[in-house]
């Protein structure tokens, strides 16, 4: 099953990349023509360069900020830590696509803040669509990823290490620099590689912010390849997709190795209570202001812009914003059958699709635990391979697969195609979630039941499932949120009947329907917010 | 060098009173062991001395240097107290080599680098790990890590060294070696040390004097011999050594002697009780003090031999009479079923 899910779409993409025409066309031949054509394209070379630049620069921004943020949050008496925690994670749970819309509405050329700025100062405003600003925004938005990993590591750190350092005469800041942060280095390094990889996959942000000035990255290059052609040049798209997988693969493998590397920093836990938070003294409020500034730039500006815009009548300059507020755009949404359908579809794919995906992941995870053989390694590798497909590529791969295997081609027009894409793209994440839940209870509990005479099935029924219920439920909620947020995977699968909010947002934005985009994006945020509330109520922690 | 004195220290976590006003002195050049069951507050006391916990009452001084005084609202941060600290898990910094771990305290004190090299190399030589200077902690065995942790805490010559279960993570054989090594170190370097342990053998072997903690209060303080041979309370008597417990009724009480009645027999012992005649009382006697008499007699009970266990060098015996169980040691196994078990009056305490 796993093999089918991960390998088949990838093979079809590879096969297509070596054809000289779309596989749906008649009389295709094998050859390297498509590769020559792509490598000959100047735009492609530029896109590769931009992608690398974007990924590296945003990593350089996100890693130091995220590490410092984690230290401030976990180890110090920073004010208001309790309510900062969930707010910090907003850029992780809301898609970069939606946040990108928000930035355009807030600080784009005719954005709300830009207009005020120009009216207030009479100066020329900044250009949101320049590469440097995109890089900065991408960097700021990925701070939480670093934060999550660094904070987890810092929390698990035995405070004895810090206490000994203090007893030998080190001041709090010295302790942070000499002991705490160096000890969290493996996690921070992992987060750095992850952010680089995410930057490579980034689609919504460069699409929305980069397009006006022609800033192209690999994902947007792939997205724009079909152009205005009647029959999309699948062979060229497959080439780009194959190249992207080839670049992603070493990154994903690196992440895996980093995760698996035996922790040389493992120490027996002392029963001492966690250290009292370091007192920041008169640095307390400056540190808070710094965090608040980041939150303002990464959360408040885009979300504020988005929400205001969704209620505003127009976005022209000089129009009194406050007077035009109303629910007009939301009423307009109801006029479009495809939009209403997309909301319903998104809910379906989140609730039902999410449950189906988690069931699938759980089955695979349980099977892996049972076998404990060579197969385990094989499945492990397959999961890694699946992760190397950026969402956009996975969507394309599923589309090509469905076109290739005629008997199941009709699935293309159903939500199942979208679900397949989602399930494959989030296979690694889902497996990790479920496996964590599985690992929480020891195999001895099962062994004990077995030795008392329970059959394998009974053990699962009476011991495994009851113990796993909360863990599985939590996994389902996280997957649900991810599926509601997802957009890139569904873009190439978009058609009547397969609309989801994410892909429809991309398509509406392309069509210039900004009013509808604003309102629909807010609805998307609302759905995620609702899911988060439920998750919070159940005590589920969300990790990117 | 000056004495470390702790006066009437009280500490609470939330509404749980961890320390209820304890006073103890560590004389210069001596080692004091804080002994007690888990949850007795011994680690909290050590952490309070280190400055890692903030008591709400009492004071901590080293000579004239006041480290903490609740009344004067004086609380020096840990880094200003100039103490050495060794944890149970050693807490060696995994990202620094053995050399760097030991040198850190000197670096913080801005010692010249040539001097640092000399002193660290000296220390490494002394703990016998000179060849491992460039290694990282995870490449060391438990015993080696423990020595590095000690060297790291001693390198800047702290006024007092605080040891939190320093031997608990070593396995049995290593622990006995390390115990002797640590005692030798304390004696030869004239260290002032405050040691936390739950292992009485360790406390007795390493420390010059002991303080037995129970639920945030000291039960008894004194030399190891005092604590072992002259327990002041039932808790102290039962905590130290391996004991038999005889529940009975107090029938006589005069001066230092008391007599309890257990299953119709009169057993005399050293009085530690405040109970009235006719009240309940408990006799405590160490396993090794119980002897076997040839026939009926004073302070003897007729008991049935239930089990014999070979525990190396000697045999441990289990006798029973109804619900009463008594254990003792002999050098050779026994053959009969019934024995007159004797509880010598000078070896039994009655509480």
Image: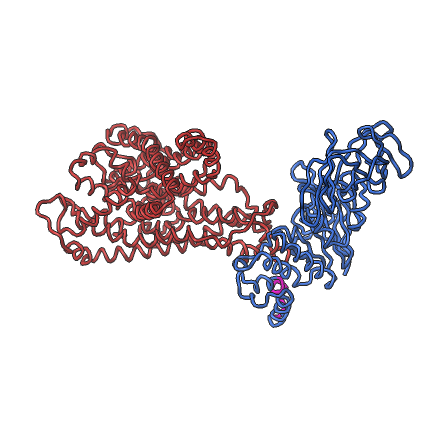
Chain colours: A red, B blue
Q: Give the residues in magenta.
A: B105-112
Q: Is residue B251 above or below residue A111?
A: above
Q: Is residue A43 above or below residue B287?
A: below
Quarter of the figure with the N terminus of chain A? top left
Residue A500 locus on image (x, y percent): 28, 35
Q: Is residue A89 left or right of residue A388?
A: right
State left or right for residue A156 relative to residue A104: right
Location of residue A477 in the rendering, given as x and y in whole percent from the top left corner = 39, 34
Where does the C terminus of chain A fall, quadrant-wise? top left
Q: Is residue A257 above or below residue A336?
A: below
* Residue A426 within the magenta-colored segment of the rendering: no
Q: State the residue lying farthest toward the left.
A: A27
Q: Is residue A37 left or right of residue B345?
A: left
Residue A49 quadrant: bottom left
Can you see residue A543? Answer: yes
Give the percent coordinates (x, y) of residue B24: 77, 49
Front one among A368 and A80? A368
- Can you give x and y, in whole percent of width and height, for residue B3 in the image? 78, 56
């Amino acid at each position: 099953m796993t093999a089918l899910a991960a390998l088949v779409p990838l093979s079809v993409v590879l096969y297509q990349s070596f054809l000289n025409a779309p596989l749906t066309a008649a009389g295709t031949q094998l050859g390297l023509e498509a590769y020559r054509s792509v490598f000959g394209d100047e735009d492609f070379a530029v896109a590769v360069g931009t992608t690398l630049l974007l990924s590296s620069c945003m990593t350089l921004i996100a890693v130091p900020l995220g590490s410092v943020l984690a230290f401030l949050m976990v180890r110090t008496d920073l004010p208001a830590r309790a309510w900062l925690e969930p707010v910090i994670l907003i850029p992780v749970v809301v898609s970069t696509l939606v946040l990108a819309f928000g930035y355009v509405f807030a600080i784009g050329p005719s954005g709300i803040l830009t207009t005020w700025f120009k009216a207030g100062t009479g100066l020329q405003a900044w250009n949101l669509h320049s590469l440097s600003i995109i890089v900065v925004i991408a960097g700021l938005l990925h701070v939480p990823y670093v934060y999550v990993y660094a904070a987890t590591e810092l929390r698990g750190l035995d405070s004895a290490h810090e206490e000994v350092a203090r007893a030998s005469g080190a001041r709090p800041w010295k302790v942070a620099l000499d002991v705490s942060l160096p000890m969290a280095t493996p996690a921070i390094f992992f987060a750095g590689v992850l952010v680089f990889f995410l930057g490579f996959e980034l689609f919504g942000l460069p699409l929305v912010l980069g397009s006006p000035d022609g800033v192209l990255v690999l994902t947007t290059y792939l997205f724009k390849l079909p152009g205005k052609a009647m029959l999309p040049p699948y062979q060229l798209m497959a080439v780009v997709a194959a190249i992207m997988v080839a670049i992603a693969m070493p990154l994903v493998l690196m992440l895996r190795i980093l995760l698996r590397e035996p922790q040389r920093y493992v120490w027996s836990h002392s029963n001492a209570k966690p250290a009292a938070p370091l007192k920041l003294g008169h640095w307390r409020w400056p540190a808070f202001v710094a965090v608040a500034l980041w939150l303002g730039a990464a959360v408040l500006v885009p979300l504020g812009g988005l929400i205001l815009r969704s209620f505003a009548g127009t976005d022209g300059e000089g129009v009194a914003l406050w007077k035009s507020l109303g629910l007009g755009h939301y009423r307009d949404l109801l006029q479009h059958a495809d939009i209403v359908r997309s909301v319903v579809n998104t809910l379906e794919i989140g609730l039902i699709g999410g449950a189906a995906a988690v069931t699938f992941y759980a089955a695979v995870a349980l099977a892996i635990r049972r076998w404990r053989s060579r197969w385990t390694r094989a499945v492990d590798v397959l999961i890694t391979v699946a992760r190397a497909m950026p969402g956009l590529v996975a969507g394309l791969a599923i589309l090509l697969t469905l076109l290739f295997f005629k008997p199941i081609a009709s699935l293309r027009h159903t939500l199942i195609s979208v679900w397949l894409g989602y399930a494959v793209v989030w296979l690694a994440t889902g497996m990790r979630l479920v496996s964590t839940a599985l690992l929480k209870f020891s195999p001895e509990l099962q062994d004990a039941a077995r030795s008392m005479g329970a059959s394998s099935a009974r053990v699962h029924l009476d011991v495994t499932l009851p113990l796993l219920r909360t863990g599985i439920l939590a996994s389902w909620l996280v997957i649900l949120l991810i599926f509601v947020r997802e957009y890139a995977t569904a873009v190439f699968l978009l058609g009547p009947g397969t609309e989801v909010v994410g892909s429809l947002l991309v398509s509406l934005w392309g069509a210039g329907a900004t009013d509808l985009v604003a309102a629909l994006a807010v609805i998307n945020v609302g759905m995620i917010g609702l899911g988060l509330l439920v998750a919070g109520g159940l005590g589920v922690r969300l990790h990117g | 060098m000056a004495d470390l004195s702790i006066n009437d220290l009280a500490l609470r976590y939330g509404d749980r009173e961890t320390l209820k006003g304890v006073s103890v002195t560590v004389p210069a050049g001596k080692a004091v062991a804080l002994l007690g069951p888990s949850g007795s507050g011994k680690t909290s006391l050590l952490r309070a001395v280190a400055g890692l916990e903030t008591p709400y009452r009492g004071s901590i001084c080293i000579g004239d240097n006041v480290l903490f005084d609740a009344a004067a609202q004086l609380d020096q941060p840990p880094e200003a107290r100039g103490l050495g600290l060794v944890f149970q898990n050693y807490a060696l910094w995994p990202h620094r080599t053995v050399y760097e771990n030991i040198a850190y305290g000197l670096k913080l004190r801005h010692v010249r680098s040539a001097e640092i090299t000399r002193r660290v190399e000296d220390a490494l030589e002394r703990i016998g790990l000179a060849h491992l200077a460039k290694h990282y902690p995870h490449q060391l065995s438990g015993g080696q890590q423990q020595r590095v942790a000690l060297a790291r805490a001693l390198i800047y010559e702290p006024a007092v060294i605080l040891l939190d279960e320093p031997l608990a993570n070593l396995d049995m054989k290593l622990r006995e070696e390390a115990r002797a090594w640590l005692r030798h170190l304390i004696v030869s370097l004239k260290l002032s040390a405050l040691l936390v342990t739950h292992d009485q053998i360790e406390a007795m072997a390493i420390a010059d004097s002991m303080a037995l903690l129970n639920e945030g209060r000291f039960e008894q303080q004194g030399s190891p011999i005092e604590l072992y041979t002259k327990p002041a309370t039932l808790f102290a008597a039962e905590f130290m050594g391996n004991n038999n417990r005889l529940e009975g009724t107090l029938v006589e009480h005069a001066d230092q002697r008391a007599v309890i009645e257990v299953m119709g027999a009169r057993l005399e012992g050293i009085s530690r009780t405040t109970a009235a005649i006719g009240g309940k009382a408990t006799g405590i006697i160490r396993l090794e003090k119980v002897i076997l008499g040839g026939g009926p007699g004073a302070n003897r009970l007729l008991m049935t031999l239930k089990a014999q266990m070979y525990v190396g060098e000697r045999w441990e015996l289990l006798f029973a009479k109804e619900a009463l169980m008594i254990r003792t040691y002999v050098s050779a196994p026994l053959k009969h079923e019934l024995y007159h078990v004797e509880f010598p009056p000078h070896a039994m305490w009655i509480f």
